[in-house]
Amino acid sequence: MLIAILVPMLPVFLLIGALTVWKKWFDRNQRRDPINIKVLRGPGQSVREKLGRHHEDFDSVAVFAIVIGPIFYIAWATRWMDQAGFEWSKHTYGWFEVALGLSLLVSYAYCLKRLIGHGTAARKYRQGLAAELASAQCLTQVMAEGGLVFHDFPADGFNIDHIVIGKSAVFAIETKSRKKPAHSGRESARVTYDGSKLIFPEHIETKPLHQAARQAEWLSGFLSRGVGESVRVVPYLALPGWFVETKVPRPSVLVGNPRNPMFMVRDGFGPALGESMKQRIAHVLSERYPAVSETRSGHIQ
């Protein structure tokens, strides 16, 4: 009888065992990665990595939720067989069945909570990734005018979504994705910026402005130390899909739709940067990125 119970679960156990053996064998492979050059990050790469981890965790919890029921059934059926030999008239219910049922409910509640958590986070990261890709696509325009663009720049404990070396300054760009109201119309897509806060149709925000300012301040110090001269960094908050109405002439943090980024490679931000300075800044930025071998786990066959 026990064999009849275990046989349906055998493929699952074999699959889990085979994947475990494969992972251990793959991790022990000592052959070296052939790529030893600096490969800069693509737009939204850190977001992609977080999204991938949530997808993996979601799948792991989903598999656990699928197999936990048969496992609990096997435990109950084994006890049933030992007690009554599968005869209903002889089977009695007691503390074991109560404990087993409660454990099953707690396990499913735990799985449901984890699945909802990972699913919610994945949706958030997908939305953020779409916004970063949209900003990156818009920023390709500045390259035609000599601007240099870097994505997903690794700083101290955070990432700067995009960096543009423009004509007269460096721009540290933070991208935010905010959903619009359900109703359509021009006003539903308008955000008013008074220099200190963002007034959306249904809420007000200030944290993204502070974040963009902090990141620009850090980048200015980092670049200034790297090139040995003061480097001006302008904070810019990108809101893809929104019409931004700025009420002050020169706010400390620029806010706008990244669809029109050409101001970054035009006059208006002080003396022009020389080509030599641009290249020095670009070199300092490039050196900050980790080598490919430092970012990959495992080895390539």
Image (cartoon, helix red, strand yellow):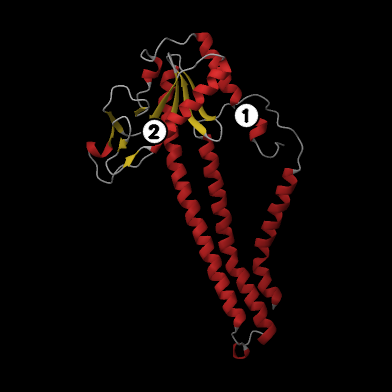
Q: Where 77 sits versus 56, above or below?
A: below
Question: Within 10 Å of the Cα at label 1, are there few (<14), some (14-19), or many (20+) other Cα atoms?
Answer: some
> Mark 1: which amino acid?
Pro
Asked if residue 247 lies left or right of residue 89, the reply is: left
> Mark 2: which amino acid?
Leu
Asked if residue 206 lies left or right of residue 69, the reply is: left
* Quadrant containing the C terminus in the rendered view: top right
Percent across and percent down for residue 278 are 51, 13
Residue drawn where x is 28% and y is 44% of the image: 202
Percent across and percent down for residue 271 are 42, 9
Mark sitting on residue 109 = none
Residue drawn where x is 56% and y is 62% of the image: 65
Which comes before the other along the chain, label 1 or label 2? 2
Percent across and percent down for residue 159 are 52, 33
Dot 1: element = loop
Dot 2: element = helix
Percent across and percent down for residue 54 are 53, 48
Residue drawn where x is 43% and y is 31% of the image: 212
Q: Where 270 sits versus 132, above or below?
A: above
Name the residue tied to disc 2: 209
Q: Is residue 229 or residue 124 the one in the foreground?
A: 229
Asked if residue 216 lies left or right of residue 107, the reply is: left
Task: Tell which tag, 1 or 2, sits nearer the viewer.
Answer: 2
Residue drawn where x is 35% and y is 24% of the image: 260
Q: Is residue 16 or residue 52 the one in the foreground?
A: 52
Q: Where 49 sits versus 91, above or below?
A: above
Name the residue tied to disc 1: 290
